[in-house]
Image (cartoon, rainbow, N blue to C red):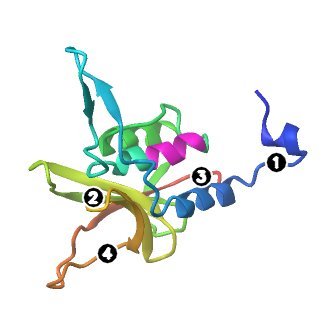
């Protein structure tokens, strides 16, 4: 397998590339569909046209950058397991580049789900937005129209080699 080093003569600037991918994903429809084939042969979009795509989005970027070991995931729990297995450290720091985990809330399918995204500034994140089905930039602690927090942050994961 060729690498950037052998192709370009320089090592990849991993953090900068990672952040460029996160920021470049804003508004993308890339993460709206993920099909599985059911036993009867029919197809099912398991992320419901982007409504439940946060883990798919985050784990796709992490996988493309080689920052996790077990590939793309559809759940926050599996993505967290992969982060921990891959050496990411849990903390409570809002640093640029950290993966952020938000606490559970009832989602459109009637079930409790956590949410996952990326810190892009000390007070902003990029995560998949269920309503539009694509990643967007938003406050880490976003409020609804009556001033209540939409979700509280549960914690962060940082990569020790950044």
- Give the mark nearest the N terminus, 3 or 4: 4
User: What segment is highlighted magenta in the picture?
Assistant: 58-64
Q: Secondary structure at mark 2?
A: loop
Q: CA distance from mark 1 to mark 2?
A: 36 Å
Q: Do we see residue 87 in this rendering?
A: no
Decide: marks 1, 4 in contact (CB < 8 A)?
A: no
Instruction: Give the mark toward the camera: 2 or 3.
Output: 2
Which residue corresponds to the image point at 29% horizontal and 76% vertical from the top-left?
142
Q: CA distance from mark 2 to mark 3?
A: 30 Å
Q: Residue furthest front?
A: 42
For the residue pair 6 and 141, the one nearer the viewer reads as: 6
Decide: marks 2, 3 in contact (CB < 8 A)?
A: no
Which residue corresponds to the image point at 52% horizontal and 48% vertical from the top-left?
61
- Give the mark nearest the N terminus, 4 or 2: 2
- Give the mark nearest the N terminus, 1 or 4: 1
Instruction: Give the mark toward the camera: 3 or 4.
Output: 4
Few, some or many C-alpha atoms within 10 Å of disc 2 (few <14, some 14-19, many ≥20)? many
Q: Secondary structure at mark 3?
A: loop
- Give the mark nearest the N terminus, 1 or 2: 1
Residue 86 numbered mark, or none: none
Few, some or many C-alpha atoms within 10 Å of disc 1 (few <14, some 14-19, many ≥20)? few
Q: CA distance from mark 4 to mark 2?
A: 16 Å
Q: Is residue 40 above or below residue 34?
A: above
Residue 141 numbered mark, or none: 4
Residue 130 numbered mark, or none: 2
Instruction: Give the mark toward the camera: 4 or 2.
Output: 2
Q: Is residue 60 magenta?
A: yes
Task: Look at mark 1 in the image and give the residue it sits on.
Answer: 11
- Give the mark nearest the N terminus, 1 or 3: 1
Which residue corresponds to the image point at 54% horizontal and 40% vertical from the top-left?
63
């Amino acid at each position: 397998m060729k690498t950037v080093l052998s192709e370009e003569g320089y090592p990849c600037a991993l953090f900068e590339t990672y952040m460029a991918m996160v920021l470049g994903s804003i508004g993308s429809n890339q993460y709206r569909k993920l099909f599985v084939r059911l036993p009867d042969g029919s197809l099912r979009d398991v992320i419901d046209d982007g409504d439940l795509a946060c883990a798919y989005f985050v784990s796709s970027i992490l996988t493309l950058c080689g920052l996790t070991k077990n590939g793309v995931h559809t759940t926050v729990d599996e993505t967290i397991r992969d982060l921990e297995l891959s050496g990411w450290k849990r903390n409570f720091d809002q640093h640029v580049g950290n993966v952020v985990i938000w606490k559970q809330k009832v989602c459109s399918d009637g079930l409790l789900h956590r949410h996952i995204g990326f810190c892009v500034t000390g007070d902003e994140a990029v995560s998949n937005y269920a309503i539009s089905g694509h990643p967007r930039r938003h406050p880490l602690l976003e409020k609804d129209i009556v001033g209540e927090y939409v979700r509280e942050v549960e914690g962060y994961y940082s990569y020790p080699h950044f």
